Image (cartoon, rainbow, N blue to C red):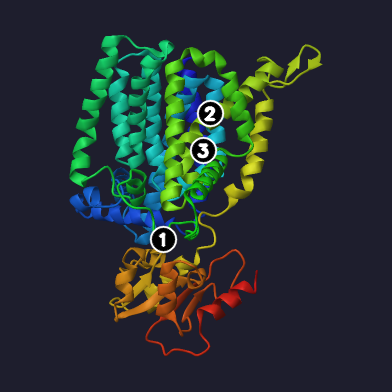
Amino acid sequence: MSKPKHAISIISLMIVVTAPLGFLVGRADVIFADGVRYIGQAERIAGGSWSDGFFRSIDHPLYPLLIAIVHGILGDRGADSWQIAAQGASVLSAVLLVIPLYLLIVELFDASTARLGCILFYLLPVNNHVFADALSESTFLLFWTWGLWSALRYLRAGRFAWLPLTIGFAALAYLTRPEGLLLPAAVLATLLAAPLLPETKLNRRPYWSAIAFFLIGGMCTIGPYVLMKGGLGTKPAIARILGNAPNSPPSAVERKEPLDPEQTTTEGLRLAVKAVATSYRDAVGLPLWPLAIVGIWASAPFLDRRRVWLFLTIIEIASVAALTRLHTTGGYCTARHAMIPAMIFIAAAARGVTWIVGQIHPPGSWRGVKGERLTLGPAIYAVIIAAFALWCAPQNRARINQGYGGFREAGAWIDHHVPQNDKILDVTGWSLFYAERPGYTFTNLGEASLDPSLRWIVVRDAHLAGPWEYCKILRNLSEGLDPVASFPPRPTRGKARVLVFDRKQKPSRTASAAAIMTEQGSIR
């Protein structure tokens, strides 16, 4: 296939994927809580606090930097403009991701598989909702996929010129999210394992030169940031995975459910494997798994490129190990965390489809008419895409972070009713973000509980009945108080009710967390 045809395919795909992402951007009840943190980092960068924004923040800086750039272009119109900038930066990266994703699948399979693979990838609800939210995954995957493609080019052809690109994009991926280190680590592991398989050997001199170049290049590109930051990353999850921090406390908020004190190591491992399997299932999409298996089996002719498949196998094994450890140390693992390994299986599913169609009917007319006989032609692709789109439609139509719009309304209420100097607590940070107010969040909840001047508390109704330690603190702070505002005013199915308490209000004998939750439960 000629380069102009590849370019036409890529441009067409970029146009196609922009519409649904733009549709979802306008359907965000609130942005994900991590997005609020990214925006706060972007504000510090835009305000000139480069040291704080780049090296002293929890998150790595490239996505917040992109938010700051987009916000500078759009102009400042308050919290909404920062949200639009964050979502715009994410969507921009997601649209540009089409280019390396297409090239990656072409490198593994062929152009028809690449077109179908890109469409399937952007139909998945997990990807759509992450890309349209204010999250860093699309920016990370943009650099990661470019690096993955250039690594495959090097491993297939052995041309040294591809190594600088691989190192450069790996560094950009790492500066977006710490898991970007997986890419250079997997390349090095592949090079070190290559001599063990006769079919994967490289010539001795280029082999050792590549290893030395990778080590030196990594130290030159990633090393300065690691030294300035004081480690590979300051996210607690990364520290726990690497063994640099203890496991999450049994009642830590990030855990899907509190840790059973009687849970054995074996049971913890079983639950972790189950959670990882579920995350893989959702990240790839249940209907695509059988097709992915067929696609991998049908790729047997490609096994003459054993270095490539060894490399991909190492990435998959390392991903499973990291996600399993994420759950065993932190108590959580979702489809969002499995997007890196899922990309390969989605590509394999597209290969499975093209292989099956090729077996049923070789390339022919679009309508599948061959002579006087009606056969299955390429039109079957349209049927497959339509069927998968229909399966994904209910989740793709759902609003981003559906049901939590009450925090946006609470933010508007705070903006109009709460004096500027009053102290506010919202563990999610959402109402504070939309009200453009400072205040206490989950990170300094302990400090808030000891502050006698704390006046306003914004909570979700479920916060008042949860089993977590922070829920107990919130119950104690709001004990005996009636909410002065509620969004929505009454419990509504599918919507979290957000309550605002005024601690200067006199306690009521009838007010209690149990009463509020009883009212909430009556609508279920």
SS state under label 1: loop
**Would you say 27 lies left or right of 469 here?**
right
Q: Are marks 3 and 1 in contact (CB under 8 Å)?
A: no
> Quadrant location of residue 350?
top right
**Would you say 322 lies left or right of 400 here?**
left
How far is disc 1 from disc 2 in space, using C-alphas? Answer: 36 Å
Residue for point 78% across, 11% down: 371
Q: Nearer the viewer, residue 323 or 17?
A: 323
The image shows residue 50, relative to residue 462, as above or below, that is above
SS state under label 3: helix
Q: Nearer the viewer, residue 448 or 134?
A: 448
The image shows residue 52, relative to residue 186, as above or below, that is below
How far is disc 3 from disc 1 in space, using C-alphas? Answer: 38 Å
SS state under label 2: helix
Residue for point 60% across, 70% down: 492
Residue 495 in the image: state x and y as whole percent: 56, 65
How far is disc 3 from disc 2 in space, using C-alphas? Answer: 17 Å
Please tell me which of labels 1 and 2 falls first in the chain.
1
Q: Can residue 440 be seen in this view?
A: no
Q: Mark 2 points at which residue?
A: 347
Query: What amino acid is at disc 2?
Result: Ala
Q: Mark 1 points at which residue?
A: 252
Please tell me which of labels 3 and 1 falls first in the chain.
3
Query: What amino acid is at disc 3?
Result: Val
Residue for point 29% across, 28% down: 167
The image shows residue 496, relative to residue 71, as above or below, that is below
Residue located farthest toward the right when viewing the structure as drawn: 372
Q: Nearer the viewer, residue 138 or 163?
A: 163
Query: What amino acid is at disc 1?
Result: Ala
Q: Mark 3 points at which residue?
A: 17
